[in-house]
Image: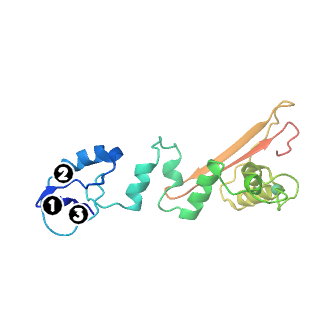
Amino acid sequence: MLSTLIVDGKWQKPFRWPADLNHLWEEILEIEVGGEGPDILIWSRANSGKISYNFAWHEVRAESEAMSWTKELWHPIQPPRMSFLCWQAALNKLPTLHRLKKWSQIQSDLCPLCGVEDETTDHLFLHCSYSDFVWASISVKSSKTLEVTWIPPLESWLKVNSDGYKSEDRFAFGALVRDHSGDCL
Ligand SMILES: [Zn+2]
């Protein structure tokens, strides 16, 4: 404790003070000796002197510009676990079998839903036959489904159809990628 270094109201350098910490002693000498009571820990970078998880997080993380979809994704009405899942998917950080196989003993990363392709984030949300079924179910249940004519792309080209919905308190987004024959990829 620092108080053990104060003798008769002055800083007293210990006899065995490490030479490589002399710069620290110089800093200590600049601290005015005074006050009474026991030593307390103070986080000097916080105005309150106390550190919190929130403060520490902002101290250690690299600040970056917010993405355009940040407000919608982290909307207060959105269930946090859904926001977190979408956030992981957007950053391709979901614990899919494809990712888990890279650092674990998993033998196969084949999608357990369709058993056809590797379970990647894109496959789960866009390419899997099961996700096709889910997207189709959502479309059927929607009361505002529009009838459109789909025109296939040129051969060897892909066409992406996307749609979204946004109200004051929630949003949804979906996309399909098809080749010239209309098959979903
Ligand atoms: Zn699948």
The x, y position of residue 73, in whole percent, is: 54, 53
Please state which of the two labelled residues, at mark 3 or mark 2, is closer to the viewer.
3
Residue at point 34% right, 50% down?
18
Residue 56 shown left or right of residue 41 in the figure: right
**Mark found first going from the N terminus, 2 or 1:** 1
The x, y position of residue 138, in whole percent, is: 71, 59
Determine the secondary structure under disc 3.
helix
The three-letter amino acid code for the residue at tag 2 is Ile
- Dots 3 and 2: beta carbons under 8 Å? no
Residue at point 26% right, 59% down?
48
The image quadrant where one finds the C terminus is top right
The disc label shown at residue 31, or none: 2
Write down which quadrant ligand 1 falls in.
bottom right
Tally of numbered tags: 3
Instruction: For label 2, count other residues whose C-alpha is less than 10 Å away and answer few (under 14), some (14-19) or many (20+).
Output: few
Residue 79 shown left or right of residue 53 in the figure: right
The three-letter amino acid code for the residue at tag 1 is Val
**Residue, disc 1:** 7
**Residue, disc 3:** 4
Residue at point 22% right, 53% down?
13
Determine the secondary structure under disc 1.
strand
Instruction: For label 3, count other residues whose C-alpha is less than 10 Å away and answer few (under 14), some (14-19) or many (20+).
Output: few
